[in-house]
Image (cartoon, rainbow, N blue to C red):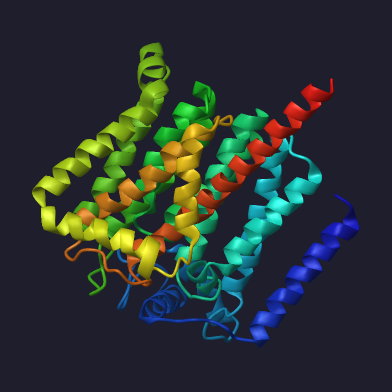
Amino acid sequence: MERWVVSAIFVSFLLFIILFTKINYSTPTQDSLFLLVMAQNISKNGLDNWVIASPASWGIFLPIIQSISSFLGEDYLRSLMPTFALSFLCLFSYMLWKFSTSMGVEIRKKIVIIIISLFVLITTPLFLLNFFYIHTNLISSVFFFAALTTFSMSSIEKEKNWLVFSMLAFWGFNLSRIENPIFTLVYFGMSLSFNKLSYKSRLIYLTPTILMVIFWYFSIARMNLGTFTDILDSSRSSTIALVYFLFLVAIIMSNFKWVEKRLLKNLNSLLFISLIFLLAWMFNEKPQHMTANLIGVLKNLFITGSWGAFWYLFLLSFLISIITPPFHYEGLFKFGIPVYFMCLLVLGFIRKLPYHDIWSDSANRMVINIMPIALLYMQLKISSNFASLNNHTIGTSL
């Protein structure tokens, strides 16, 4: 890349940060105040003596970044969320360009697809709100999108350097919200079925992330917490760490051929079937609670969650995709998106109260993680059809 391009990007980002430092469009709620209190705790006490909120109730990534504001003499970093939003729009455009290029889509059509995608993102009410909302949702979504797309790109381009970015993104994702390691574990399992990593690559690229989660959640279990917002207790934190340890053991044992051929090859199907049986058991155990969760999620997606028409369009495109030829690696999307919502319902089982049909409900905000992936899938289906049309035209002309 030319130096002037890099310089222009750097200056543009700098001006953007200055603009949103001077013009404050931040949208805070009570949750935002808890996160900012955590930031103050970190700047003054490190990871000790938590007041009101702690890592057992909120992800640590945003409070760590916001703790810098204390040293700058500010109440909080006003430009942080808009900067993440701009970074995400650039990241989404770049990854959509890369995926479309791998399909052989023409430049003009790629530009049109990217413009349409950006328009959808900035006109979806809930997603636009999170560009300024002081919370963990947008940050979590950025890391999740980066983690999954770079992991997939490593398989498409046969380039392992993509896995470095993927694992770094998974680190950020796991530290953004306390339930994210559950999603990570499921998607690690699914990705291993689609991305045929060698045993050495599995050890090099997956182990550091697994060890980080184990270390962090054992650390949470040993912290002196007890704030009234805590969700994780010592047993829950230790359980998450223990499950990750068992997954690490499975990765180490995956060198055995029977594990690689019979387990890893079919891991996505096993996970999907296991989630179906788990949800069936949960609906049997708490029928009213789980039914309320399901209704709450559906109402938020299509009526009360401030998603506009996005999920109607996605549902239509998903149904159409069933009868159209699949593109390479499409299975990861077809499995991954439904699995995310299944995991969302599983998490709802352990809640005391069911999900609410309001935009600010935690389940509705967690949907922000998967929305960009769903949009990418919709656009890749369009790209694959463009590519098929190009190939058909070339073949006809020949």
Q: Residue at x 59, y 62 (%)?
A: 120
* Quadrant in which the C terminus is drawn: top right
Q: Residue at x 27, y 52 (%)?
A: 345
User: Taking 110 as reference, is 192 left or right?
Assistant: left
Instruction: State how many labels appear.
Output: 0
Residue 59 appears in the rendering = no
Q: Nearer the viewer, residue 317 or 193?
A: 317
Residue furthest to the left: 285
Q: Nearer the viewer, residue 159 or 377?
A: 377
User: Measured from the top left, where is residue 128 in percent x and y?
Assistant: 55, 71
Residue 320 appears in the rendering = yes
User: Measured from the top left, where is residue 56 in percent x and y?
Assistant: 30, 63
Residue furthest to the front: 396
Residue furthest to the top: 257
Q: Nearer the viewer, residue 83 or 36?
A: 83
User: Taking 128 as reference, is 290 left or right?
Assistant: left
Q: Image quarter for residue 260?
A: top left
Q: Where is 112 relative to 44, above or below? A: above
Q: Where is 82 relative to 318, above or below? A: below
User: Measured from the top left, where is residue 275 in percent x and y?
Assistant: 27, 39
Q: Residue at x 35, y 49 (%)?
A: 341
